[in-house]
């Protein structure tokens, strides 16, 4: 990886069965504030220098592993980092985007099959 490319661990995603129940738990017990929400499907909580995201588990997202956690690394050079990881033998998926979210995303797997994600915020 080139020295000019910086990766910052910015978010941990937990895949959960009941987003609303866990949102209530983390806001009531830890004082975390909701910064983004798609009711019943997706919530982002402000945990200081890191975000905790709650993502409804189910058929819409399959990790292929038993792990329910995803580390998200923020970068300003997603394609470059993805290509570097591919050239180093990492398993990487295609770059994707979602309507209403101003970022590009790319999932990959570490050598034990744990899923991580690269995110590049746009504009």
Image (cartoon, rainbow, N blue to C red):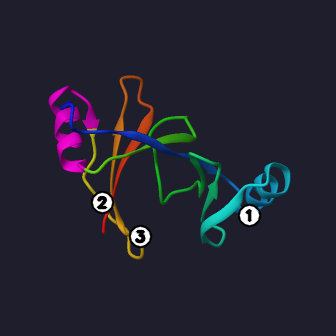
In this rendering, is residue 89 above or below 119?
above
Expressed as whole percent of the image width and height from the top left, the position of residue 4 reads 21, 37
Quarter that holds the C terminus: bottom left
Left or right side of 93 for 12: right
The residue singled out by tag 2 in the image is 96
Where residue 81 sits, quadrant-wise, is: top left
Mark 2 and mark 1: span between their CA atoms?
26 Å
Is residue 90 within the magenta segment? yes
Q: Residue furthest top?
A: 111
**Where does the magenta region start and end?**
77-91
Q: Up-down: is 117 above or below 1?
A: below
Question: Secondary structure beneath disc 2?
Answer: loop
For residue 20, the mark is 1
Q: Secondary structure at mark 1?
A: helix
Label 3 and label 1: CA atoms lie apart by: 21 Å
Q: Which residue is mark 3?
A: 101
């Amino acid at each position: 990886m080139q020295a000019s490319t910086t990766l910052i661990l910015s978010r941990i995603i937990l895949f959960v069965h009941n987003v609303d129940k866990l949102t209530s738990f983390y806001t009531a017990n830890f004082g975390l504030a909701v910064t983004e929400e798609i009711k019943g499907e997706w919530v982002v909580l402000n945990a200081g220098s890191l975000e905790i995201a709650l993502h409804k588990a189910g058929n819409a997202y399959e990790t292929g592993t038993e792990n329910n956690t995803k580390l998200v690394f923020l970068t300003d050079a997603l394609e470059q980092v993805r290509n570097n990881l591919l050239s180093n033998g990492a398993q990487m998926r295609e770059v994707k985007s979602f309507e209403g979210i101003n970022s590009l995303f790319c999932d990959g797997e570490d050598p034990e099959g744990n899923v991580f994600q690269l995110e590049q915020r746009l504009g």
